[in-house]
Amino acid sequence: MKKKSITEQLKNNVYPGRGIILGRTPDGTKAVAAYFIMGRSANSRNRIFVEDGEGIRTQAFDPAKMEDPSLVIYAPVRVLGNKTIVTNGDQTDTIFEGMDKQLTFEQSLRTRDFEPDGPNYTPRISGVLHVESGAYSYALSILKSNNGDPSACNRFMFAYSTPIAGEAHFIHTYMGDGNPLPSFEGEPELVDVPDDIDACTDLLWDSLNEDNKVSLFVRYINIADGTYETRIVNKNR
């Protein structure tokens, strides 16, 4: 698979929806995790990311304007020991609770499927990073309807046991804008990431569509010792 520019991937897609990027910095020292949300409706756009312990959660920017919190308010990032979980919905909690009971990432997601928001049936995308004693691996998952048919859920898991320096994998909910919104297709896209967290944050935020972007989370984890840095950007301030 040819590595692509994450800048170009984002700039060429007006509406990737929600996206997860997991990878490793070019110098090989840090694990990279990024998650962004976008919105077309007023309800989706009325959100911010806020810190919640070692993770984050979504929150209404203006509580008086929140219409339906069911699919927009959740914890996108939670930390369980040396594992960092990143998802686009409340399956973060499902994975956290499952892995806390010694289930695997894949086993934990067996109880979930795509979102009940027909006709889009938004895919559930999830990732987990495992950093321990200088070792690093990550996995990504997508649960989606069968080409828009909600009678079947197609489940795809992608495991990266030896992440390569300078490479990341990008998975997002939609191929682009549309009615209904077309679900992501194929393997996670191979993209580049920079060494510096601030450069990465600026690059991602500036590349997202100005009208539709809502919030961005970026975390760089030191593979040697598990310490990390986090950046959060919200369009609503």
Image (cartoon, grey):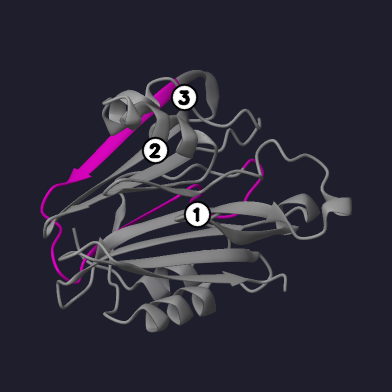
Position of the C terminus by quadrant:
bottom right
Residue contact at pointers 3 and 1, CB within 8 angstroms: no
- Going from the N terminus, do you reach mark 3 or mark 1 first? 1
The residues bearing labels 2 and 1 have C-alpha atoms spaced at a distance of 26 Å
Q: Please give the name of the residue rendered at 40% of the width and 35% of the height, measured from the top-left corner.
A: 96
The residues bearing labels 3 and 1 have C-alpha atoms spaced at a distance of 25 Å
Residue nearest the observer in this picture, 53 or 140: 53
The residues bearing labels 3 and 2 have C-alpha atoms spaced at a distance of 11 Å
Q: Is residue 174 magenta?
A: yes
Residue 189 figure quarter: bottom left
Mark 1 surroundings: few (<14), some (14-19) or many (≥20) residues within 10 A: few
Q: Is residue 180 left or right of residue 97?
A: right
Q: Which residue is identified by label 3? A: 112
Label number found at residue 53: 1
Q: Is residue 136 left or right of residue 141?
A: left
Q: Secondary structure at mark 1?
A: loop
Three-letter amino acid code of the residue under disc 1:
Gly
Q: Which residue is identified by label 2? A: 142
Residue nearest the observer in this picture, 83 or 72: 83
Mark 3 surroundings: few (<14), some (14-19) or many (≥20) residues within 10 A: some
Residues shaded magenta: 153-180
Q: Identify the residue at the far top of this view.
A: 151
Q: Please give the name of the residue rendered at 46% of the width and 68% of the height, measured from the top-left corner.
A: 10
